Amino acid sequence: MKMLRMLSVVFLSALVITACNDDDSTTNGKGKASIYITDAPIDDANVSAVVISVNRVEANGPEGWETIEEFEEPVSIDLLSYQNGEAFLLTENEMDAGTYSEVRLILNIKKKVDDQLQNEGSYIEYIDGSKEPLFVPSGAQSGYKAKGEFTIPEGGVVGITLDFDVRKAVVKAGSSGNFILKPTIRLVANQDAAMINGHFNIDSLDSAGYDKVIAFAYENDTFAESEMDEPEEGEVRFANAVTSSVVVDGDFTLAFINSGTYDLYFAAYDENGEFVELIGSYEDVTLEAGAKLELDLGLDLLN
């Protein structure tokens, strides 16, 4: 295992773990869930925003599907604004105590009507100000789902984060040219999550002439050389990465990772967001639940 320094047990206000409630009259077989949204960076350097609009939040639990909150007005969220450990609090509401298996978002988006894509609030925006509607198959009906188990104890509060990772989720749908949001979302129970704050020797990156470097986190021994191959239509490179982060001024953050052992891979991209080469890897990084870890890296430390 690499030598890491633990900074703190709780790394974000979003990491609300189970809390006791002394007022028995308010429990009544109920607890609370705080639902957050976060994201990982997108490869395309021309994209400035990826906006989703949410009508309703539901969860599948002891009594089947339960509405957590239905908003009076749709809530619009630019996913690209919540990266590197930042998270958007979508809702915090009382729910039945018990174990849940998935959360779904009912989106403010419509199906095709007369072969035209009708979209009310979910879209991609480019740096030139132009927009493309974003389509989610069944997003307005059965919802956009994230699977993952979490438990709400009676009288407790549990934080849940939905990680969209639009790098993998937003793809162009074949000959239609429509952009769709694939169901790649991760559900992370915050009390089980950890974070890596990485600090790269910026001089070593500058001297190597890299325009852009992205850090990818893989579960231990799951990376394959084929991850770097030219992707097929609708797919991306490094598709099996758990999460990723752009290295900015030598710093990167890999957040909302479940406890376990991970391998970090670093890839160089050009100014247009095109993959150039794999720089190297830093392997066998072990994370404990709720931990915030710091890594000091340089090119000489990579495999």
Image (cartoon, rainbow, N blue to C red):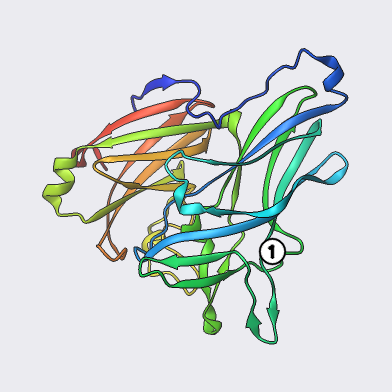
Q: Identify which residue is drawn at 81% across, 30% down.
A: 97
Q: Which residue is mark 1?
A: 139
Answer with the quarter of the image where residue 1 lies: top left
Using residue 180 as the reference point, say whether residue 204 is left or right of it. left
**Rendering coords of residue 8 (x, y %):** 44, 20
Q: Which residue of the protein is positioned furthest toward the front in this rendering?
A: 72
Q: Nearer the viewer, residue 244 or 138?
A: 138
Q: Which residue of the protein is positioned furthest toward the top in this rendering?
A: 22
Q: Quadrant of the C terminus?
A: top left
How many C-alpha atoms fall within 10 Å of the one at disc 1: few (<14), some, or many (≥20)? many
Residue type at mark 1?
Gly
Q: Is residue 1 among the parts visible in the rendering?
A: no
Rendered position, 287 above or below 228: above
Q: Identify which residue is drawn at 25% across, 62% down.
A: 271
Q: Identify which residue is drawn at 62% across, 71% down.
A: 119
Q: Which residue of the protein is positioned furthest toward the bottom in this rendering?
A: 114
**Rendering coords of residue 46 (x, y %):** 35, 66
**Rendering coords of residue 123 (x, y %):** 54, 66
Secondary structure beneath dot 1 equals loop
**Rendering coords of residue 81 (x, y %):** 45, 49
Using residue 102 as the reference point, say whether residue 270 is left or right of it. left
Answer with the quarter of the image where residue 14 lies: top right
Rendered position, 7 above or below 62: above
Q: Nearer the viewer, residue 232 or 46?
A: 46
